[in-house]
Amino acid sequence: MISSDGIPPIKTKDIQIRETSRGLKIELPLKKNEQIYGFGLQLHRLNHTDRKKVIRVNSDPVADTGDSHAPVPFYVSTAGYGVYVDTARYASFYCGTNLPKGASKHLKDKKKAVGTSEIELYGYQTAEGDRSVVVEVPVAKGIDLYFFEGPNMKAAVQRYNLFSGGGVLPPAWGLGVWYRAYSAAKNEDVMRLAEGFRNDNMPVDVFGFEPGWQTRAYSCSFLWDDHRFPKHEEMLEKLYKMNYRVNLWEHVFVHPSSPMYDDLTPYSGDYEVWDGLVPDFALKEAREIFADHHLRHFIEEGISGFKLDECDSSDFVHSNWSFPDVAEFPSGLDGEQMHNMLGVLYQSTLLSAYKSVNKRTLSQVRSSGALASSYPFVLYSDLYNHKVFIRGVVNSGFSGLLWAPEVRHASSAEDLVRRIETVVFSPHALLNCWRIPNPPWMQVDQDKNKQGEFFDNYEEVRELCKTLFETRMSLIPYLYSSFAKYKYEGIPPFRALVMDYPDDPTTFNIDDAYMMGDSLLVAPIVSEESERKVYLPEGRWWDFWTNTPYEGGQSYVIEPKLGKPPVFIKDKSILPIAAPLQNVKDDTVFNLTVKVYGENPKDFILFEDDGTTYNYEEGIFNRVRLSYNEAGKGAVERSGNYIENRYQITNWKYVN
Amino acid sequence: MISSDGIPPIKTKDIQIRETSRGLKIELPLKKNEQIYGFGLQLHRLNHTDRKKVIRVNSDPVADTGDSHAPVPFYVSTAGYGVYVDTARYASFYCGTNLPKGASKHLKDKKKAVGTSEIELYGYQTAEGDRSVVVEVPVAKGIDLYFFEGPNMKAAVQRYNLFSGGGVLPPAWGLGVWYRAYSAAKNEDVMRLAEGFRNDNMPVDVFGFEPGWQTRAYSCSFLWDDHRFPKHEEMLEKLYKMNYRVNLWEHVFVHPSSPMYDDLTPYSGDYEVWDGLVPDFALKEAREIFADHHLRHFIEEGISGFKLDECDSSDFVHSNWSFPDVAEFPSGLDGEQMHNMLGVLYQSTLLSAYKSVNKRTLSQVRSSGALASSYPFVLYSDLYNHKVFIRGVVNSGFSGLLWAPEVRHASSAEDLVRRIETVVFSPHALLNCWRIPNPPWMQVDQDKNKQGEFFDNYEEVRELCKTLFETRMSLIPYLYSSFAKYKYEGIPPFRALVMDYPDDPTTFNIDDAYMMGDSLLVAPIVSEESERKVYLPEGRWWDFWTNTPYEGGQSYVIEPKLGKPPVFIKDKSILPIAAPLQNVKDDTVFNLTVKVYGENPKDFILFEDDGTTYNYEEGIFNRVRLSYNEAGKGAVERSGNYIENRYQITNWKYVN
């Protein structure tokens, strides 16, 4: 655990707050070399120093404004502290962007060349010297500010995550491969896909249903459609027998044909969306009605989770589909507040249903916010190009969020493989194939896929995908244990390099590579490029695929083979690798080869529990310590009170 | 003049206003077939029915949010009325976007197919039936609403423009061709260009200087640079002798090295921009200091106008260059209000300097707002593609604004010509060549232009441009008289087709063609296309170039030759065409051929005055009525008290 000095990182006397015509203005000190990160799922930028960010939920953030599926009014600094502004309003953070009048008077005689381009004219001037972060909170008349100590940025993030209740410990099966099926699928289409994966030995843990499973979507009835899925219980039983978990798509808007409609009407906002109610999940009554329906109709039928769509709002794109900021809710929240909170309230509502039956879920959500680290919901959206997806993984770790760089489209077989490379080395190995009836390794072109026109070399493509899925499966114990550190120590399992190397300025703006756990550095490549530069921080690093050593503190140009993205292991690591499985059952035992990189490696601690319930919260788990002594012997030390073994260590491999 | 029934278009009992947690919420009725237009310089959309618009000044409006260089809280309806909400705050207009809870309960059993694409899923539903426009004004506790009668949309716009003081009557020279020169130009570069135009007989009226003329820019000193322009007064005299008017670039931010800096300091906002002050032009003192400096240093040296840059703010793009919303100004305005007002206040400040010496200006500005019809400043920005530039021309007419679809870049010689076609049939024939030292008809590629590598066929390209410039010059009397109608009747000289044909649904969404005056329909073509569809409203139309008649009420596919964009003249029009000149001098007399299209044409009234002063406001002008009687004779009837003649009618041409 990290200790505390008990010294606030920012002194009260250095904080200015006052009321203005528009709300509150808060000024916090910002010293000249500080770098600012955070603000949630910021997809367009990593480093927010000298930038403005508005904390506004938006499903279509087309520019670097701060708008995000999951904006968070929390930032951290390389100086080693974090600041959380406790508001649901569209707060603006000006991270040292502006200087007060007269600050540059002394620069009167400084020369400046005449520009002949916008960049030269606008000449992005980093304001020099110490300045301020200015936070504006509209409407508010008072505010709670939370300051998180360091001593470094990672510790500040840890404290924020622990303050939020600790990070997510997902069910072990959640770390496997997910496949979301064609939205217009019927029973037979589902079975065809599901049987196909098993026949082809493609590891898939979770099968996702898209909108077509309900009688009505946009807005939702929350009832199985008997025409597309007659006797759906039997279909589910077959899927469970094939060791699939099932995840159902939905969104929060309740259609008049839903059995929940009349009960929820008094506990909903004053505008409808897609003909449906917007339940007010800040009210206990609304949460109970909604959670209860899900429990009785789905969770008790074994549904393992949900995809919570469209809780992120957008008034601006091809349609104005969400409620306006001026909406009112019976709890007293207005539309602005509800937009910023809906994702979190929605997650909380469904999580309570799972907790009530002591089953862990890993689910998906399109919006989240502050203090959400403990919610087992991964953020997603299918709007972005590959580089933006990657940046989302890098950034989420600053704010207690998880992001899936989902594979939902590919321009070619090569592009498909590159995207799968990224997703298997990400928090959530998700293929979102809602637009195609046949798997993408058969054909990525949407029209051809619908017409059954497949790649000539689909078997080759499928093999590449299978190998990557197996790699993912082999990393589950490592990942699971990294998530346990998220839970108990608040260390984000996926994080920017600057968080681990805050004194290395080369890492300050690296938004295309990240740490996966403590030992893996992942630098995905996009299909538009045949090579990429990878910066390895100081120390030695080992190529994941070839075991070749690299000396760090410098960049390398890597030309990765298809199916083998740039992944490096930190020297002095112990890395457990499992024999890959097709899926993770409740009683799965992982057979591990333990790889040791370099001399005098750091111990690795596997977290061992039932992987599916909340019993670990009662202390029912083991810590399995893997260590490697100077004499060249590996040791396994198990301690705890969980009576079963989920890990068998089969052998050790020393890499040097 | 239009008469008034004195009946408010919206009854008081149908207006709902109340305070909310965030400000004010206003609801106004919207009937099911109404189409909504307006909201200022909206570059991304013409028809705002079922859309949300936020009235926020922004120099980089990347999406259809309402953000604009010149957003205006004013809209008009095809039902024949206009609504102005008098606020400088970032008001939101929801034009029938949302239905109240329960409105769709009766649609419970309506079928909806399962979508397999975003559009199908989000299924843009136009809310059916009567609904509301909801306006939210943040912060405000009270509001003035102005309703403009019809009986039709054009009349409502006229009333708004007259309420604003009437539209602009620009100086006649302002309607000629403008050339803004290379920003790094020195004295010799300016003379080379200026002499070159005259030698090549390229009509150019206004020569524009970009930032390099000042000792300092970003922020500005407002002083001539003696190194690049030693003895600038002599250079100006030479330019005036060649019959150029001179326009100087600037922006509002005052650098510490400016003689105005110390005087303006107490009358400026609490943040600086690019090291400089933000003068508070809501204060008389600041306006006087600024206007006085411009009068003494520039206007009295014969400078004909200014280009008021960067008054439109952006916190979001490659740099955060403007003051924050949370800024405060000594007048009491905050940053939000100042952002929405800065363009208008800046225009007003410089206009007062010109009025004080009884000289008309036509200038340029990057931001404007409400009630600005009378300000002789044309909006511009160089950010957009050709189609967006065109849409800006179509849209501006709803809100009392003028927009220049400037030529500032071209991908090829053909693209250059197409863009010049558009700009000569627009409010402002502006070539903005600040990035290239040689004229664009020599070379459009920036690097090659700088190195003097010209088109092989530059003479041919130049000829095409010259012919288009001459066409512009020949239309000046027609345009000038159209602007006089803007001044006295409030009729926008450039306007969307729907404004003239509000009962023709085909026009509702035409954002790529517009009326230029009462008689010309302009449908520009972009170089990416070799042909385009042109919709001609009911009645007959005549091809401007060939005099071929077309029957309206239908669309035609036109393949316009290079240099001859699709332009049509309404049947029964009288159109004065001047012999083209190189420039418009103070004593210029236009020699007119009067073209008559069709039988029993409507009279055309030429507005005749000195073209340069405000004497017309004292009634010193003539109306020169051109009519054509059934006997086939043209008649000229001059009435008024301006003693000189600016128009000589040389002959008449009858087209049938």
Image: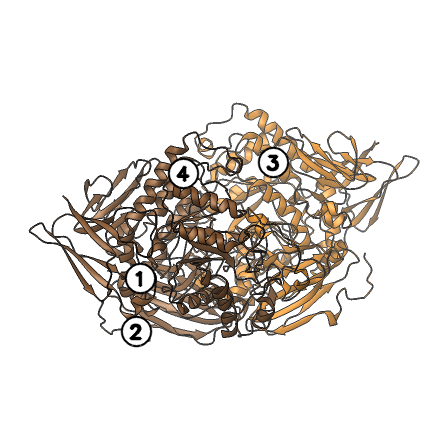
Chain colours: A orange, B brown
Judging from the image, what secondary structure is the residue with disc 2 in? loop
Whether B525 is drawn above or below B108: the answer is above
Whether B47 is drawn above or below B418: the answer is below
Q: Which residue is mark 3?
A: A526
Q: Is residue A527 left or right of residue B117?
A: right
Q: Which residue is mark 4?
A: B415
Dot 1 falls on which chain? B
Q: Do marks 2 and 3 share a chain? A: no
Dot 1 or dot 4: first in sequence order is 1
Q: CA distance from mark 3 to mark 4?
A: 34 Å
Q: CA distance from mark 2 to mark 4?
A: 51 Å
Q: Which residue is mark 1?
A: B77
Q: Which residue is mark 2?
A: B11
Q: CA distance from mark 2 to mark 3?
A: 60 Å
Residue type at mark 2 is Lys
Dot 3 falls on which chain? A
